[in-house]
Image (cartoon, helix red, strand yellow):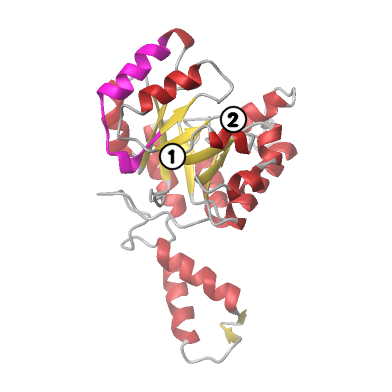
Amino acid sequence: MQSFSMGPAILFCPADRPDRYAKALERADAVIIDLEDAVAAGSKPAARQALVGNPLDPDRTIVRVNPVNTPDFAADMAALRQTGYRTIMLAKTETLDDLAAVAGFNVVALCETALGVLNAPQIAAADNVVALMWGAEDLVASLGGSSSRKASGTYRDVARQARSQVLLAAGAFGKVAIDSVYINIPDHAGLLGESLDAAASGFGAKASIHPGQMPVIRQAFSPSAEQVERATRILAAAKDAAGVFTFEGQMVDEPLLRHAKRIMSLAPGNGFGSPPDGPGDLPPA
């Protein structure tokens, strides 16, 4: 499997809207051409034709296919094999059998059911999985619930647990973790807060549903000038230190040095955090 090299701002685009393909890729670090939820049942055949007939850069394109146990899956895969795309997002990934059905492709495993979340560690361990993403609304629906968020906009506890479990599973096996979408499109403040939390927690990217969300997500995943300046000074001080040392009243040990190095790797100019001329490296979660 090829390495997964895409920046932090990933944008869904309906597969039956080929007029939006190129525009989406211009705005995002990577685009997810969606054959699943974004396309009505009657439009799926035309969407597959559009996928085949309107190629994008395969290194920055993911194709979301329908779940393995649905009638649309085989047709999706037949269309996909007529393209140069080799990275897919498998909707409602639940078992290793699901992953076996897409052997030969790089897989972003979308864990969005109770079973998929519970099986996240074994999914993350699979050789053809390059990243894991979690989905809030489908997860809650699979439990018989009605909403993943409280009236305040924050996630309910079960969604927070699923988010953490998918992140931990991805990190345990060196795979990228992608945070779920923020569906309140005009609420950039809420998106920024959630994206900052995702970046600080270890997610490598955040998926989105609107081009206007791209700058907000990039801002969240790019360290501030103050963070870069402090990380630079900590790493400089470490060169003259032997083991644990104190820096401006704070104890600095190996984990804090790794944090500083991580900040430096995400700084604009290091291939991550600024709008792409090409794909930026997406470090493992």
Q: Determine the main secondary structure of the stretch shown in magenta.
A: helix
Q: Secondary structure at mark 1?
A: loop
Three-letter amino acid code at the position of disc 2: Lys
Residue 81 at what x, y percent from top left?
Answer: 35, 28
Image spot of residue 280 (x, y percent): 34, 53
Distance from disc 1 to disc 2, alpha carbons, whole Å, reads 19 Å
Provide the residue span drawn in magenta. Answer: 43-62
Query: Viewed as shown, does residue 52 lie left or right of 179?
Result: left
In the depicted structure, whether residue 48 falls above or below residue 195: above
Instruction: Name the residue tied to disc 1.
Output: 104
Rendered location of residue 229, percent (x, y): 42, 72
Closer mark to the observer between disc 1 and disc 2: 1
Q: Residue at x 63, y 50 (%)?
A: 169
Residue drawn at (37%, 38%) of the image: 86
Position of 96 relative to 146 (above/below): below
Mark 2: which secondary structure?
Answer: loop
Note whether residue 280 is visible. Answer: yes
**Please, is residue 47 above or below residue 55 in the view?**
above
Say the numbered circle drawn on residue 92.
Answer: 2
Q: In the rendered view, does 134 fall on the left or right side of 42?
A: right
